[in-house]
Amino acid sequence: MFDNEMFLSVMNDLGITLTDEISNGKFTRLLIKKETMTINMTLSFPKVISVDSVVFLRRKLTDFFVNDNMYKKINIEFKYDDNSIDDDTLNKYFDYILSVFETKKPRYSIIKLINHAAINGNVKLFVANEDEMPTLLPMLDEINKIFKLYGLTSKCILEVSNFEVPI
Protein backbone atom coordinates (compact mmCIF):
# COMPACT_ATOMS: atom_id res chain seq x y z
CA MET A 1 0.00 0.00 0.00
CA PHE A 2 2.70 2.47 1.02
CA ASP A 3 6.29 2.36 -0.01
CA ASN A 4 9.54 2.67 1.84
CA GLU A 5 10.10 6.23 0.55
CA MET A 6 7.09 7.54 2.48
CA PHE A 7 8.32 5.84 5.65
CA LEU A 8 11.83 7.25 5.21
CA SER A 9 10.40 10.71 4.59
CA VAL A 10 8.39 10.60 7.84
CA MET A 11 11.41 9.29 9.75
CA ASN A 12 13.44 12.17 8.34
CA ASP A 13 10.72 14.68 9.34
CA LEU A 14 10.84 13.26 12.86
CA GLY A 15 14.62 13.66 12.98
CA ILE A 16 15.20 9.94 13.34
CA THR A 17 18.65 8.71 12.39
CA LEU A 18 18.05 5.59 10.35
CA THR A 19 19.70 2.39 11.43
CA ASP A 20 20.05 -0.74 9.32
CA GLU A 21 17.31 -2.24 11.46
CA ILE A 22 14.63 0.34 10.67
CA SER A 23 15.70 1.67 7.27
CA ASN A 24 13.67 -1.01 5.45
CA GLY A 25 10.43 -0.15 7.22
CA LYS A 26 7.23 1.01 5.63
CA PHE A 27 3.70 2.01 6.55
CA THR A 28 1.22 -0.71 5.64
CA ARG A 29 -1.75 1.00 7.25
CA LEU A 30 -2.35 4.64 8.00
CA LEU A 31 -5.86 5.61 8.99
CA ILE A 32 -6.69 9.08 10.26
CA LYS A 33 -10.07 9.58 11.93
CA LYS A 34 -10.73 13.30 12.02
CA GLU A 35 -13.92 13.01 14.08
CA THR A 36 -12.03 11.33 16.96
CA MET A 37 -8.65 12.90 16.19
CA THR A 38 -7.10 9.42 16.16
CA ILE A 39 -4.39 7.87 14.01
CA ASN A 40 -4.11 4.12 13.49
CA MET A 41 -0.93 2.97 11.83
CA THR A 42 0.93 -0.22 11.15
CA LEU A 43 4.68 -0.24 10.59
CA SER A 44 6.08 -3.21 8.69
CA PHE A 45 9.62 -4.51 8.58
CA PRO A 46 11.30 -7.45 6.84
CA LYS A 47 12.28 -9.02 10.18
CA VAL A 48 11.67 -8.48 13.89
CA ILE A 49 13.34 -5.32 15.18
CA SER A 50 14.68 -4.86 18.71
CA VAL A 51 12.42 -3.82 21.54
CA ASP A 52 14.55 -0.68 21.88
CA SER A 53 13.67 0.30 18.31
CA VAL A 54 9.98 -0.44 18.86
CA VAL A 55 9.90 1.71 22.01
CA PHE A 56 11.88 4.47 20.31
CA LEU A 57 9.61 4.58 17.23
CA ARG A 58 6.46 4.51 19.36
CA ARG A 59 7.77 7.38 21.50
CA LYS A 60 8.86 9.53 18.55
CA LEU A 61 5.58 9.03 16.66
CA THR A 62 3.50 9.69 19.79
CA ASP A 63 5.53 12.80 20.64
CA PHE A 64 5.07 14.16 17.14
CA PHE A 65 1.40 13.37 16.53
CA VAL A 66 -0.12 13.44 20.03
CA ASN A 67 2.07 15.37 22.42
CA ASP A 68 2.28 18.24 19.94
CA ASN A 69 -1.54 18.28 20.08
CA MET A 70 -2.13 17.40 16.44
CA TYR A 71 -4.19 14.34 17.44
CA LYS A 72 -5.63 12.96 20.67
CA LYS A 73 -4.51 9.36 20.27
CA ILE A 74 -2.24 7.21 18.15
CA ASN A 75 -2.43 3.43 17.86
CA ILE A 76 0.74 1.87 16.49
CA GLU A 77 1.11 -1.77 15.51
CA PHE A 78 4.12 -3.60 14.13
CA LYS A 79 4.18 -6.36 11.52
CA TYR A 80 7.05 -8.44 10.17
CA ASP A 81 7.50 -10.40 6.96
CA ASP A 82 9.61 -12.88 8.94
CA ASN A 83 8.32 -13.30 12.50
CA SER A 84 11.12 -15.57 13.68
CA ILE A 85 12.79 -14.26 16.81
CA ASP A 86 15.85 -15.45 18.68
CA ASP A 87 15.56 -16.28 22.35
CA ASP A 88 17.76 -13.39 23.49
CA THR A 89 15.65 -10.80 21.64
CA LEU A 90 12.44 -12.38 22.97
CA ASN A 91 13.82 -12.23 26.53
CA LYS A 92 14.47 -8.51 26.05
CA TYR A 93 10.90 -7.94 24.85
CA PHE A 94 9.53 -9.94 27.78
CA ASP A 95 11.68 -8.11 30.35
CA TYR A 96 10.73 -4.71 28.94
CA ILE A 97 6.99 -5.45 28.83
CA LEU A 98 7.09 -6.93 32.32
CA SER A 99 8.89 -3.85 33.70
CA VAL A 100 6.23 -1.56 32.20
CA PHE A 101 3.39 -3.62 33.66
CA GLU A 102 5.18 -3.93 36.99
CA THR A 103 5.41 -0.12 37.24
CA LYS A 104 1.68 0.30 36.60
CA LYS A 105 0.44 -2.84 38.31
CA PRO A 106 2.70 -4.06 41.15
CA ARG A 107 1.09 -7.52 41.19
CA TYR A 108 3.09 -8.25 38.02
CA SER A 109 6.24 -8.36 40.16
CA ILE A 110 5.28 -11.91 41.12
CA ILE A 111 6.23 -13.00 37.60
CA LYS A 112 9.84 -12.03 38.30
CA LEU A 113 9.87 -14.70 41.02
CA ILE A 114 8.98 -17.40 38.53
CA ASN A 115 11.67 -19.19 36.58
CA HIS A 116 11.17 -18.46 32.91
CA ALA A 117 13.03 -18.87 29.67
CA ALA A 118 12.57 -18.02 26.02
CA ILE A 119 12.48 -21.34 24.21
CA ASN A 120 11.73 -21.79 20.51
CA GLY A 121 9.99 -18.46 20.10
CA ASN A 122 7.84 -18.56 23.23
CA VAL A 123 8.40 -17.59 26.86
CA LYS A 124 7.87 -20.54 29.18
CA LEU A 125 7.14 -19.82 32.82
CA PHE A 126 7.60 -22.75 35.17
CA VAL A 127 5.21 -23.22 38.11
CA ALA A 128 5.09 -25.84 40.84
CA ASN A 129 1.49 -26.90 40.25
CA GLU A 130 -1.68 -26.12 38.32
CA ASP A 131 -3.17 -24.26 41.32
CA GLU A 132 -0.86 -21.33 40.53
CA MET A 133 -2.08 -20.97 36.96
CA PRO A 134 -5.38 -19.08 37.51
CA THR A 135 -3.49 -16.26 39.26
CA LEU A 136 -0.97 -15.92 36.46
CA LEU A 137 -3.03 -16.51 33.32
CA PRO A 138 -4.74 -13.07 33.22
CA MET A 139 -1.37 -11.35 33.59
CA LEU A 140 0.18 -13.46 30.85
CA ASP A 141 -2.80 -12.74 28.59
CA GLU A 142 -2.02 -9.02 28.95
CA ILE A 143 1.64 -9.60 28.09
CA ASN A 144 0.59 -11.70 25.08
CA LYS A 145 -1.58 -8.80 23.86
CA ILE A 146 1.46 -6.52 23.91
CA PHE A 147 3.52 -9.14 22.09
CA LYS A 148 0.85 -9.08 19.37
CA LEU A 149 0.78 -5.27 19.28
CA TYR A 150 4.55 -5.32 18.82
CA GLY A 151 4.13 -7.75 15.92
CA LEU A 152 5.37 -10.85 17.69
CA THR A 153 3.73 -14.23 17.30
CA SER A 154 5.34 -15.35 20.56
CA LYS A 155 3.29 -16.32 23.59
CA CYS A 156 3.84 -16.72 27.32
CA ILE A 157 3.12 -20.30 28.28
CA LEU A 158 2.79 -21.78 31.76
CA GLU A 159 4.31 -25.17 32.39
CA VAL A 160 4.24 -27.29 35.54
CA SER A 161 7.71 -28.33 36.64
CA ASN A 162 8.66 -30.73 39.42
CA PHE A 163 11.70 -28.56 40.13
CA GLU A 164 9.71 -25.49 41.23
CA VAL A 165 8.49 -24.54 44.70
CA PRO A 166 5.00 -23.08 45.12
CA ILE A 167 4.73 -19.28 45.05
Image (spheres, rainbow, N blue to C red):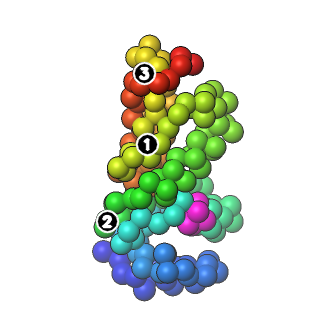
Residue 163 coordinates in the image, percent (x, y): 47, 24
Which amino acid, by three-letter code, is at mark 3? Asn
Can the viewer see residue 145? no
* Magenta run includes residue 55: yes
Q: Secondary structure at mark 1?
A: strand
Kindly identify which residue carries mark 1. 123
Q: Secondary structure at mark 2?
A: strand
Residue 8 coordinates in the image, percent (x, y): 49, 83
Does label 2 or label 3 sit earlier along the sequence?
2
Within 10 Å of disc 1 (Cα), the crowding (few <14, some 14-19, many 20+) is many
Does label 2 or label 1 sit earlier along the sequence?
2
Kindly identify which residue carries mark 2. 82
Can the viewer see residue 88? yes
Q: Nearer the viewer, mark 2 or mark 3?
A: 3
Quarter that holds the N terminus? bottom left
Farthest-out residue, front: 163
Q: Nearer the viewer, residue 78 or 82?
A: 82
Q: Secondary structure at mark 3?
A: loop
Q: Is residue 45 above or below residue 113?
A: below
Within 10 Å of disc 2 (Cα), the crowding (few <14, some 14-19, many 20+) is few
In the visual, does 71 lie left or right of 140? Answer: right
Kindly identify which residue carries mark 3. 162
Which amino acid, by three-letter code, is at mark 2? Asp
Q: Residue at x 36, y 72 (%)?
A: 46
In the visual, does 40 lie left or right of 28? Answer: right
Residue range of the region highlighted in magenta in the rendering: 52-58
Q: How far apart are the alpha carbons under marks 2 and 1?
A: 19 Å
Query: On the image, which quarter does residue 63 sit in?
Result: bottom right
